[in-house]
Image (cartoon, grey):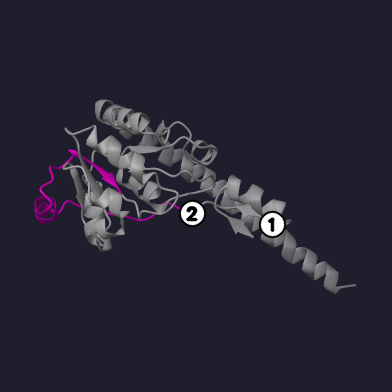
């Protein structure tokens, strides 16, 4: 059984499943700039925080919207529908929050690639989001929840925060104030990620070859 990370592997082994860790490769994306799309949402290139959430149960929506309200000088862009929010939140959204609704891949990448930072939070261990991988490829500094899973996945590359109003706000300020540092961290991380992925692929290939050899031997008896 192939699993994405060590935390999922640990859970699978509790179920007595044989596992091999093989993380997903980073996606192949183009850093594109679509002026018309940015202007449609009244955004300024490099001057907003992208929040690529789907309003799932593990996303701290209430804490996020309050943190946005307390950071009025920063614009936040959420790539989902306002109608998907709980009614009590939807009726009291901060004025510096833009909700784009669903975007196709091209438009999503265009808005993502011009953000100052990406805010990707979860309350659930073992979660590995595709949006974090997209941020790494596009060179967008990451603000993530401080969990065992994220520490193992991303090491010293992102800004780690708690899922609280004040911590979210502080993480955003840090990302904006030290953006160059975290962009450089991404470049270093991409190199180490590629090396680790190569090692994992070789380990998978070795185990498959050994398994095939065992089958061949067993057929002789």
Mark 2: secondary structure: loop
Instruction: Name the outermost residue toward the front.
Output: 88
In the rendered structure, does residue 177 fall within the stretch colored magenta?
no
The quadrant of the rendering that contains the N terminus is bottom right
Q: Are marks 2 and 1 in contact (CB under 8 Å)?
A: no
| Depth order, front residue of 60/101 | 60
Mark 2 or mark 1: name the one nearer the start of the chain: 2
Evaluate whether residue 209 shows in this view.
Answer: yes
Q: Which mark is residue 207?
A: 1
* Horizontal and vertical percent position of residue 103: 24, 61
For mark 2, does the 10 Å Cα neighbourhood hold few (<14), some (14 to 19), or many (20 or more) residues? few
Which label sits in the foreground, 2 or 1? 2
| Depth order, front residue of 71/119 | 71
For mark 1, does the 10 Å Cα neighbourhood hold few (<14), some (14 to 19), or many (20 or more) residues? few
Left or right: residue 60 compared with residue 219: left
In the rendered structure, does residue 26 fall within the stretch colored magenta?
yes
The part of the chain drawn in magenta is: 25-51
Q: Which mark is residue 24?
A: 2
The quadrant of the rendering that contains the C terminus is bottom right
**Residue at left 30%, top 31%?**
169
The span from disc 2 to disc 1 (Cα, nearest Å) is 18 Å
* Horizontal and vertical percent position of residue 105: 28, 61
Instruction: Name the outermost residue toward the right.
Output: 221
């Amino acid at each position: 059984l192939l699993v994405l990370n060590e935390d999922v592997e640990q859970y699978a082994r509790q179920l007595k499943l044989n596992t091999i860790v093989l993380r997903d490769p980073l996606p192949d994306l183009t850093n594109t700039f679509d002026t018309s799309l940015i202007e449609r949402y009244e955004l300024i290139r490099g001057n907003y925080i992208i929040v690529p959430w789907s309003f799932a149960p593990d996303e701290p929506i209430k804490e996020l919207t309050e943190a946005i309200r307390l950071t009025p000088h920063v614009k936040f862009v959420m790539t989902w529908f306002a109608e998907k929010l709980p009614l009590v939140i939807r009726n009291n959204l901060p004025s510096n929050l833009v909700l784009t609704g669903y975007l196709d891949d091209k438009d999503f990448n265009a808005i993502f690639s011009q953000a100052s930072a990406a805010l990707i939070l979860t309350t659930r261990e073992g979660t590995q989001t595709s949006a974090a991988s997209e941020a790494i490829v596009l060179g967008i500094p990451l603000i993530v929840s401080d969990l065992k899973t994220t520490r193992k996945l991303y090491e010293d590359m992102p800004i780690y925060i708690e899922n609280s109003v004040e911590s979210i706000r502080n993480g955003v300020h840090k990302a904006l104030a030290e953006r160059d540092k975290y962009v450089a961290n991404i470049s270093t991380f991409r190199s180490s990620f590629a090396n680790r992925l190569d090692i994992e692929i070789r380990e998978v290939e070795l185990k498959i070859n050994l398994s095939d050899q065992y089958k061949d031997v067993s057929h002789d008896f």
